[in-house]
Amino acid sequence: MELNDLRPALGASKNRKRIGRGTGSGHGKTATKGHKGQKARSGGNIKAGFEGGQMPMQRRLPKRGFTPLTKKVYAIVNIGQLEIFDAGSTVDADALLACGLIGAVADGVKVLGTGELSKSVSIKAHKFSASAKEKITAAGGTFEEI
């Protein structure tokens, strides 16, 4: 026995289906594609999600995003911006709005710790970052969460 004598076992390999090679093959005429229609034509294919022209499911369902309904939007103020206020003054949302540091307050004011504060001011806001709290107390001021 030599390498050129080796053959697969009987029934282990099948011939591929040769379609469209005459009626004698059993797969002639329509070549296993059925009769007429888009799928029988050359290059005929149907896009995923196509439902025969009716409004597809992905367009019938309402759009619903990932925006949380309870999300709060805070106006941001940095510590360095509060230098414009006099020492000993009270800074709240109305004062920030009056001097133009914030626009219309949506859900409150948050004070962040960017910049330096050299005056002692009393700040009333809805939220404070940890670094902002440290810098306010280091400057001798006070903060109050509303």
Image (spheres, rainbow, N blue to C red):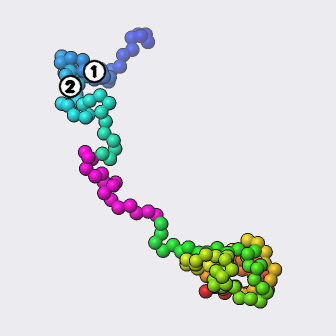
Eyeballing the image, is 20 above or below 46?
above
Q: Nearer the viewer, residue 65 or 18?
A: 65
Image quadrant assignment for residue 100: bottom right
Q: Is residue 42 left or right of residue 22?
A: right
> Does label 1 or label 2 sit earlier along the sequence?
1
Q: Is residue 75 left or right of residue 65?
A: right
Residue 78's x, y, as percent?
Answer: 70, 74
**Residue at the disc numbered 1:** 18
Name the image quarter holding the C terminus. bottom right
Q: Residue at x 20, y 21 (%)?
A: 28
Q: Residue at x 35, y 19 (%)?
A: 8
Residue 144's x, y, as percent?
Answer: 66, 87
- Calculate the distance from the C-alpha at mark 1 to the C-alpha at mark 2: 13 Å
Disc 2 marks a residue whose amino acid type is: Thr
Are discs 1 and 2 less than 8 Å apart at CB? no
**Badge 2: residue crowd in 10 Å (few <14, some 14–19, many ≥20):** some
**Residue at the disc numbered 2:** 30
Asked whether residue 56 is drawn in magenta, I would say: yes
Disc 1 marks a residue whose amino acid type is: Arg
Q: Is residue 1 left or right of residue 44?
A: right
Q: Residue at x 36, y 16 (%)?
A: 7
Q: Nearer the viewer, residue 34 or 85?
A: 85
What stretch of residues is rendered in magenta? 51-66
Q: Is residue 71 left or right of residue 139?
A: left
**Badge 1: residue crowd in 10 Å (few <14, some 14–19, many ≥20):** few
Name the image quarter holding the N terminus. top left
Q: Name the element at disc 1.
A: loop
Residue 58's x, y, as percent?
Answer: 34, 54
Q: Name the element at disc 2.
A: loop
